[in-house]
Image (cartoon, rainbow, N blue to C red):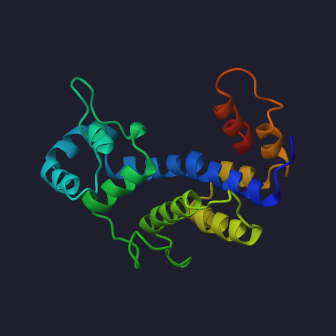
Amino acid sequence: MASLSVGEENYVRMSLLLTGVSPRAARTFFDSEFAPACLGATITKQYNTLFDLKNKHVINQSQWNLLFPRFPDVPDSKTFDVTLMILLLRNLAQINPPLCGYDRLPSSMEISSAADLARIKYYRNHLAHLEDGKVDTTFFNMAWTDISGDDHRKVTKEMEIMKTSQKDTVPWNIRGKQFEGRGCTSQLIERSIGI
């Protein structure tokens, strides 16, 4: 099997950051705004607002089912993806939005939690719309720095490990040399980010 190119490796690393590490950071912030023990009550209290968002097709049926699961289940942020968490923070929480809003990439000078969420959203969308599955190194380095921030913005150890790990770790694992049995995807992610 052929080796991955640098652009493909950058794509994989960014994907792991945006689907593995970033959602945990977003969930931590989400849970600080919406206490997990009170999440069900908070969502029920905001039913009318959420129903309006559903009618405007901002919330889809799948998201609605997560917000209002069948009894006896209750909403749990662990089941929410980044998109739903950002949607709820944006529409229900009392946080100041980024200067340019949630739908555009904030300036690197803007270091609020809302700006960090907008960055995650922006780069996830960017990655989702790439057709060739490649990210050039200049863009990768800029995006990585933008997403993970500086030391004063709580750079996580796992982000740094993932970026600086041995250059061929991700491609080697992806080539299948260590895939054994079920759960290989989670093993790949765990090895790649050093968990």
Q: Residue at x 68, y 56 (%)?
A: 133
Locate residue 190 relative to residue 127 in the image: left or right.
right
Q: Position of residue 146 (x, y in %)?
A: 60, 68
Q: Residue at x 75, y 23 (%)?
A: 180
Residue 195 seen in render: no
**176 or 95, nearer to the observer:** 176
Q: Is residue 104 above or below residue 66?
A: below
Q: Position of residue 143 (x, y in %)?
A: 64, 67
Q: Quadrant of the C terminus?
A: top right
Q: Residue at x 46, y 61 (%)?
A: 117
Q: How many marks?
A: 0
Locate residue 65 relative to residue 140 in the image: left or right.
left
Q: Residue furthest left?
A: 48
Q: Residue at x 22, y 56 (%)?
A: 53
Q: Position of residue 153 (x, y in %)?
A: 56, 64
Locate residue 113 relative to residue 171 in the image: left or right.
left
Q: Is residue 147 above or below residue 40?
A: below
**58 or 161, nearer to the observer:** 58
Q: Quadrant of the N terminus?
A: top right
Q: Position of residue 5 (x, y in %)?
A: 82, 56
Q: Residue furthest top?
A: 181
Q: Is residue 50 above or below residue 115?
A: above
Residue 172, picture quadrant: top right
Residue 172 seen in render: yes
Residue 20, picture quadrant: top right
